[in-house]
Structure formats: C-alpha cells, structure tokens
Amino acid sequence: MSINRLLHTFRIQYGAVNKGLFLQSRMFSNALPMSVQLQPQLLHLSPLVRQLFSYNSCLRQFITCFCTKPSTSNFENKTSPDLKKETPDLNLSHVDNQGRVQMVDVGAKAESNRLAVATAIVYLGAKAFHLLKENKISKGNVLTVAQLAGIMASKQTPNLIPLCHNIHITHAEVNLELNEDKFAVNITGSVNSVGRTGVEMESLTAVTVAALTVYDMCKAVSRDIVISDIKLLKKLGGKSDDHVAT
C-alpha cells in the first residue's frame, strides 16, 4: 500500500489529528511497554493500523513523524547535544561568524618561503597514447603545449578562484611523463613563492589546466579520456604544519 493510501486510511478510520490522538515517540521504544492510556484507543483502530504497531522501529518512526498531532509548544530547530559533541570545530577561514564568504586578511602574517607540489593523471587509452608518444596528434606537440598551459595557469589562479590572493610566484614548473603501462600521462606541478600565504591552489591549478590541455588536444582521437587523481602532494612553509601526502 502506498504512503498516501496508508495516511488516507488512517485519517478516515480514526481521524487521529482531529480527535487528539497523541502517539508519543516514547511509546514506540522497544525498551518500554506501551502506555496504558494508549491501549483503549488502539482498540478503535482498524486491523491494518493496529498491525503497524508490531512492525520494526523504522515503521514505528514513520508513524511517529507523520501521524502525530503537534504539541502546543513551539518547535525549534535544535541540534542534539550528542551531535554537537561529535561535530568538530571546522574553523573555515573563508567563512565569517555570520556564515558569509570572506577573503582572508593575511596582512599580519610574516613572509616565508612557500612550496606546493600537486599531481594529476590523464588516462588516454592505447590509441591516443601511441599517437601522443609519436607526436602525431594533429594539434601539435601535446606535452609541450600542456606544460606551458600549466605554468601560465598557475599565474592566473586568483582570476579563477574567487578568494585566492594575488601571489608573487618566484618559480613554477610543470612536468609531464608518459606511463606506458597505463597508457597515461603523469603530471607534476610545483610552485614556489615568498609571501604571506601558501601556493597550494597555484600548483593544483597548474596540473589541472595541463591535464585539460592534454584532453583538449587528444579528444579528437578518443572521447574516453579520463582525468584523475588531482591532489596535493606536498606543502612547505607558513605558520601551519608542513604537509606531505602519504
């Protein structure tokens, strides 16, 4: 029986809400006996509805949620105390105390040497891989163009990511290596700077755009190319702890 029909049957045969039937959630607990005050009312229910009370806790919870007359007290959107204890403090720096986005003020930070290294993998498939390896892709030298695209992209990161800072990059490097076992291109990008904030986004942007460039130049050969495993490998410098991916 559908939910709508079940609710319709319940309303017609008993008029739970209008007649003041309160199905307290505590009455459905497996650990507690059913309230004596509720038993006489259950005798007036149809066999179908009475049978519902013997089902598992999920169905009992359904009845509690959809067949309970609201109490006269005001409802408040409160978080369970237990849930609050289990939820860690995230301290998102790009969100203010009122939940609005903000650009982080790094003016008070000390300058330090920064380094970030990121990687990406482009799975080409056998046909596209061999054409790329032999430099027979019609658009030109894929590896060289993708390398330049990645370096250029690292310098455009604040124009692409809204809350990134303009960073004085001292060095950017993108390397592409062929993986013949997987018919793939492994891309590594590293970015250096001396400043008040890190260059993780710059290195990630570099490898992502380099991967997209490989895709663009090879897509005429295959539509099954997959860009995967874009991730940060290493971050050095700054107030926070250094990070090296495991």
Image (spheres, helix red, strand yellow):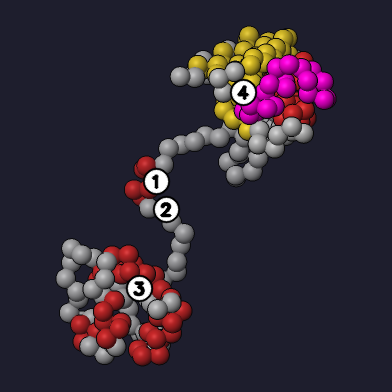
Point out the frontmost of discs 4 and 1: 4
**Residue 89 versus residue 231 in the image, above or below:** below
Tell whether position 55 is magenta. no
Residue with the mark numbered 3: 63
Say the numbered circle drawn on residue 84: 1
Q: Who comes first in sequence, dot 4 or dot 3? A: 3
Q: Who comes first in sequence, dot 4 or dot 1? A: 1
Point out the frontmost of discs 1 and 3: 3
Horizontal side, residue 200 vs residue 46: left or right: right
Query: What crowding class fits label 4: few (fewer than 14 Cα within 10 Å), some (14-19), or many (20 or more)?
Result: many
Q: Who comes first in sequence, dot 4 or dot 2? A: 2
Q: Which residue is drawn at 78% across and 20% down?
A: 136
Q: Which residue is drawn at 55% across and 19% down?
A: 181
Which SS class for mark 1? helix
> Can the viewer see residue 200?
no
Say the numbered circle drawn on residue 184: 4
Residue with the mark numbered 2: 79
Give the amino acid at mark 4: Ala
Give the amino acid at mark 2: Thr
x and y percentages locating residue 194 in the rendered image: 68, 10
